[in-house]
Image (tube, rainbow, N blue to C red):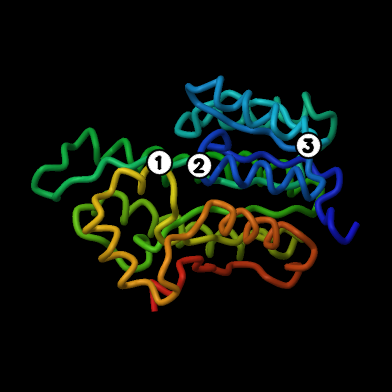
Amino acid sequence: MADRPLEGRVTLVTGGSRGIGAAISQELAAAGAKVGVNYTANKDAADAVVAAITTAGGTAVAIPGDVSDPESAVAMIDQTEELLGDDLWNVVANAGITRDNLISRITVEDWDRVIEVNLGGTFHVCKAASRKLLRKKRGSIVTMSSVVGLHGNFGQTNYAASKGGVIALTKALAKEVGSRGIRVNCVAPGYISTELTDVLSEDIRDVLLGQTPLGRLGEPEDIARTVRFLLSDDASFITGAILSVDGGLGM
């Protein structure tokens, strides 16, 4: 059990088919969790993550659903339980999008959509999961914010607002459900090597690295290992925490 701290625990990872979400899905499965890999549109990507997990001896299923739709959030949790054959234990609210621009150029539609997915989606998933976990009086939720939600960033007022809201939601929810044995924590990644950062120019990457004391971009696995810890019993006295995984960028 030492190397499989999540043995048999049904866990939904929203946005679990790509980038950080895919790394989280695979890390949790390697730790013994039975993982629902949520996707919105790219079924092939979710199927590929599921195949990688099952090939490695783990258990996973692909779960369609749009976190910004409250009915879909409920359905994806129900389907996760049905397909994995047990009650929900953990949720990782990872799904998110960006629509970056200067505030003078951000459209109302782009503002609304980022808030709707990043903050609204986290709310819908946490609400649906809490109803399940409260009945069992156990379980853990990990939300996903960002260094941008803590410190802001040029050209990302909508994203910063959504991720700052996730932090506030996490703290309030942790206070609501803690007495029932449910823990709620938040991870705030710095700049992670994914498709989003791969398109950055060399000059911008150099600036980011110069601001990061550890002198490198993070890897999706850095975030995944942190999530695994927060979901495990090793973190049994941690709730309402905002854990920055950013190489020191936010100091």
Front residue of 30/124: it is: 30
Q: Is residue 214 above or below residue 168?
A: below
Describe residue 87's horizontal placement relative to residue 98 as left or right: right
C-alpha span from label 2 to label 1: 7 Å
- Mark 2 vs mark 3: which is more N-terminal? 2
Q: Is residue 142 above or below residue 23?
A: below
Question: Residue 59's x, y, as percent?
Answer: 79, 33
Label 1 sits on a secondary structure element that is helix
Q: Is residue 214 above or below residue 190?
A: below
User: Within the image, what quadrant is residue 109 found in?
Assistant: top left
Residue for point 54% across, 68% down: 243
Q: Please, which residue is most extreme toward the right here?
A: 1
Q: Residue beneath label 2, please?
A: 19
Residue for point 62% across, 61% down: 226
- Mark 1 vs mark 3: which is more N-terminal? 3
- Mark 2 vs mark 1: which is more N-terminal? 2
Mark 2 against mark 3, which lies toward the viewer?
3
In this orientation, does residue 67 appear?
A: yes
Q: Residue beneath label 3, please?
A: 56
